[in-house]
């Protein structure tokens, strides 16, 4: 039999009882510390690491009920299981003991076998609880690392000032690692790609799909975004609808047990032409320089159904000063404590109010409006916003 390392604090004003319990516990290879009243017990529990307390109730200076309550109030002793060992056998006495924070209650005269069984049971629960807490700490640390990796995949800087496009974004992750990702990709001198996707669920599984999909959407990774047309013929840029179709084939729901929504856009800055495909994502908003708005809804279902429903592509012409705002459902579904959602109406009103406001200031105002609405409630989903303004054709 391997030696038991747990330390038990025996608290009783009767020395004979303390000696008897000490003998029983030491034979079972526990370490034993003794205290003669509640005040002495509290002092020793704070000074010495203790795994369990056997506590009498009727004692001078401080009774067992008070000692137990004090232990549960102290950060250093609140997690130590307490077993009352008392001659007070009335039901109301046992209820008082449990309400003061005890884990168990044994009446005197006690049986040696019962005491050891109760001690082993509480120590086993304590050890299992410790293991769960340690595992959760390691998991929390892993999630923080994963969140850092995910954040590193976001754009590192805004597009240079001389670009025909002005890009800004804001990203507020929720407490759990989520599935939002977006990026801006320069494909050649006159073409930019922008995407925003949101993988279903939270946690590591969703984050892994997010990272994988973001790597698929890198221009240098493969031919998903550009196709080599042969020697001397350059590259052909793949259309948004074909990019979405390929992702739909690569990420079947049956394989990953996840789906994701996606908006993929291709912007020709020379022609002022935007082509896009919206796969089940909240519809981006086109906010024209003249103050009118339009939802960009052309597309199809979320990615993961493997062609069960068709995708289509939308095309619009951009004029100087036009803006496009992309977002995830974490924005409109941001919830206050009273179960009220931020909603599409508030979001659209905020966009309309932004006429004449710089695009970066607009996103700051929108984030402030969300915070005011939420009254400090933590978001349950990532809040992701990306906006760009078309500055007109180069040299036009």
Image (spheres, helix red, strand yellow):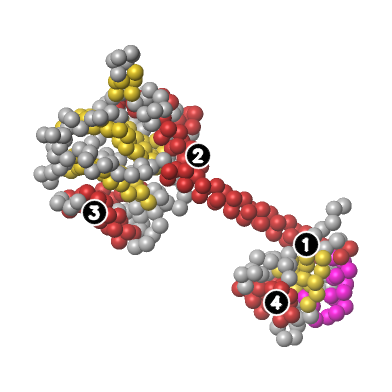
Mark 3 to mark 1 CA distance (whole Å): 60 Å
Q: Is residue 288 left or right of residue 309?
A: left
**Precedes in sequence: disc 3 or disc 2:** 2
- Across and down, in percent, residue 37 comes to 75, 81
| Residue that mark 2 sits on | 205
Task: Compare residues 277 and 226 and report the one nearer the observer.
Answer: 226
3 or 1: mark nearer the eye: 3
| Residue that mark 3 sits on | 361
- Across and down, in percent, residue 181 comes to 38, 40
Residue 257, compared with residue 44, is above or below; it is: above
Q: Which residue is drawn at 51% across and 47% down?
A: 145
Label 1, residues with CA under 10 Å away: few <14, some 14-19, many ≥20 = some
Tell me the element at label 2.
helix
Q: Picture quarter containing residue 31? A: bottom right
User: Does the magenta segment cover residue 16?
Assistant: yes
Q: Which residue is drawn at 26% across and 42% down?
A: 160
Q: Is residue 225 left or right of residue 101?
A: left
Residue 24, compared with residue 271, is above or below; it is: below
Q: What stretch is highlighted in magenta?
A: 11-25
């Amino acid at each position: 039999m391997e030696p038991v390392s747990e330390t038990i604090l025996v608290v009783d004003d009767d020395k004979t009882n303390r000696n008897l319990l000490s003998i029983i516990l030491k034979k079972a290879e526990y370490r034993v510390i003794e205290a003669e009243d509640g005040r002495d017990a509290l002092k020793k529990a704070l000074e010495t690491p203790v795994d369990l307390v056997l506590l009498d109730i009727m004692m001078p200076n401080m009774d067992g009920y008070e000692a137990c309550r004090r232990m549960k109030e102290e950060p250093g002793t609140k997690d130590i299981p307490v077993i009352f060992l008392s001659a007070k056998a009335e039901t109301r006495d046992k209820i008082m003991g449990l309400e003061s924070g005890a884990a168990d209650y044994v009446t005197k005269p006690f049986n040696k076998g019962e005491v050891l069984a109760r001690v082993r049971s509480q120590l086993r629960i304590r050890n299992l609880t410790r293991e769960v807490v340690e595992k959760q700490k390691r998991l929390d640390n892993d999630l923080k690392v994963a969140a850092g990796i995910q954040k590193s995949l976001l754009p590192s800087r805004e597009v240079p000032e001389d670009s025909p496009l002005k890009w800004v974004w804001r990203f507020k992750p929720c407490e759990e690692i989520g599935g939002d990702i977006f990026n801006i990709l320069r494909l050649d001198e006159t073409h930019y790609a922008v995407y925003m996707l949101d993988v279903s669920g939270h946690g590591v599984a969703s984050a892994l799909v997010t990272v994988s999909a973001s790597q698929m959407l890198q221009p240098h990774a493969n031919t998903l975004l550009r196709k080599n047309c042969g020697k001397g013929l350059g590259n052909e840029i793949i259309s948004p609808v074909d990019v979405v179709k390929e992702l739909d084939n690569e990420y079947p729901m049956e394989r990953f047990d996840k789906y994701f929504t996606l908006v993929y856009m291709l912007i020709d800055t020379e022609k002022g032409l935007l082509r896009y495909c919206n796969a089940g994502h909240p519809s981006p908003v086109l906010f024209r320089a003249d103050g009118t708005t339009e939802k960009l809804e052309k597309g199809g279902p979320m990615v993961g159904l493997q062609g069960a429903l068709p995708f289509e592509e939308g095309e619009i012409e951009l004029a100087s000063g036009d803006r496009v705002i992309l977002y995830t459902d974490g924005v409109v579904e941001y919830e206050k404590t009273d179960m009220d959602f931020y909603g599409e109406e508030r979001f659209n009103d905020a966009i309309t109010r932004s006429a004449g406001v710089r695009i970066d200031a607009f996103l700051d105002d929108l984030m402030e409006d969300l915070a005011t609405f939420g009254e400090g409630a933590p978001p349950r989903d990532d809040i992701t916003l990306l906006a760009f303004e078309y500055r007109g054709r180069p040299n036009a």
